[in-house]
Image: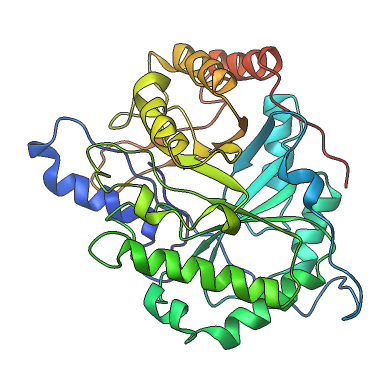
Amino acid sequence: MIRSALAARGLPYRNRRAVALAVVAPLLLAACSTGGGGTTAAPTSAAAGPTASPSAPPYDASALRRPGGRLFGVASDGTVGDLAPVTAFAAKAERQPDIREYYQEWGDDFDPAGNTKLWHNGQVPMLSWVPEQAPLARIASGGEDAYLVRFAQQVRSYQGPLVISFAPEMNGGWTAWGPGHATPADFVSAWRHIHDVFREQATTNVIWVWTPHVGDSGTPAALRPYYPGDDYLDWVGLIGYYGPQDGSDYRTLFTPTIRTVRSFSGKPLLIAETGVAEGPRKVAQIDDLFGGAAASDGLIGLVWYDLRRQWPGSKQPTDWRVDSSAASVAEVVKQAAQQKFGFRIAP
């Protein structure tokens, strides 16, 4: 599993599971892999860039809540307005990504200009919003409302759609908001409160995606108690990786969790973060990922984590990039076309 690349404020949540795995590795034969490293500078000001007048209606994102094709996205480092990762991924994958996932800490302002730039380039921004320093109970009780109201107003001023993944991997103990740090009730209350504040501010251009990590030996927590309810989200997202310590095929990595989720939610399904580690099976696993995803009922797309990272405790970097080898990138190009991933979205 890979975590967000927020390294500027101490150990990023994306790295914490790697540290835990380094400690318990002799005791575990299989556990989730972790991500880490890198630095994503979060936007610090919302003053720049185009905004709508206070009386202007927000962008209507309703048509995107059930897209008419399979989305193909990229998660990478860099600020939201930095188009270099998008351009590089498009050149490798031979198609423009439909989604660009970026990472931002709770407390930092929304960046209308950067998101507008990305949207005008043809990508739906997907914000992975990480409450590293804000306890979920405090958010739920209204203790963060001054920031939350301001943020919702900033998002409303942006004339485009925004996918928000709040507190991703809430079922993982390596996060500051997961088991051992917060309860499922804390998470649900915080999620619903955020959603309610956005609704009160008439911020209707958001697509809400609930993103647990796939269930495995490192994430034994039951998912149902974390579910905010159908009225509070638009998509169900899953995070899972084909890696040295993660799953090796779709049937064991994603299918059990999809089956569990489908017992209580029929919402569109997005694989919100995934990748295949470089290794002798990468080409076959790319086939397995795209084939399994395409065959999953209600799946609307996948987002590829296109980075190479050295995790704490590991001896060598893990290369998740689509072009970690010539054979790898050729297979991604082939499978994306064959399984019809890539749905050109017009701003």
Picture layout, residue 272 above or below residue 157: above
Q: Position of residue 170 (x, y in %)?
A: 38, 56
Q: Position of residue 17 (x, y in %)?
A: 28, 50
Q: Position of residue 302 (x, y in %)?
A: 59, 33
Q: Is residue 42 left or right of residue 14?
A: right
Picture layout, residue 158 above or below residue 147: above
Picture layout, residue 38 above or below residue 43: above
Q: Residue at x 74, y 24 (%)?
A: 94
Picture layout, residue 244 above or below residue 8: above
Looking at the image, which is closer to me, 198 or 307? 198
Residue 249 in view, yes or no = no
Looking at the image, which is closer to me, 30 or 200? 200
Residue 159 in view, yes or no = yes
Q: Residue at x 8, y 38 (%)?
A: 27
Quadrant showing the N terminus: top left
Residue farthest along the left direction in this orientation: 27
* Colour scheme employed for the rendering of this structure: rainbow
Q: Is residue 234 left or right of residue 248?
A: right
Give the quarter of the image for residue 188.
bottom left
Q: Residue at x 20, y 45 (%)?
A: 21
Q: Position of residue 157 (x, y in %)?
A: 81, 72
Q: Residue at x 34, y 23 (%)?
A: 252
Count of numbered circles on the image:
0
Give the quarter of the image for residue 304.
top right
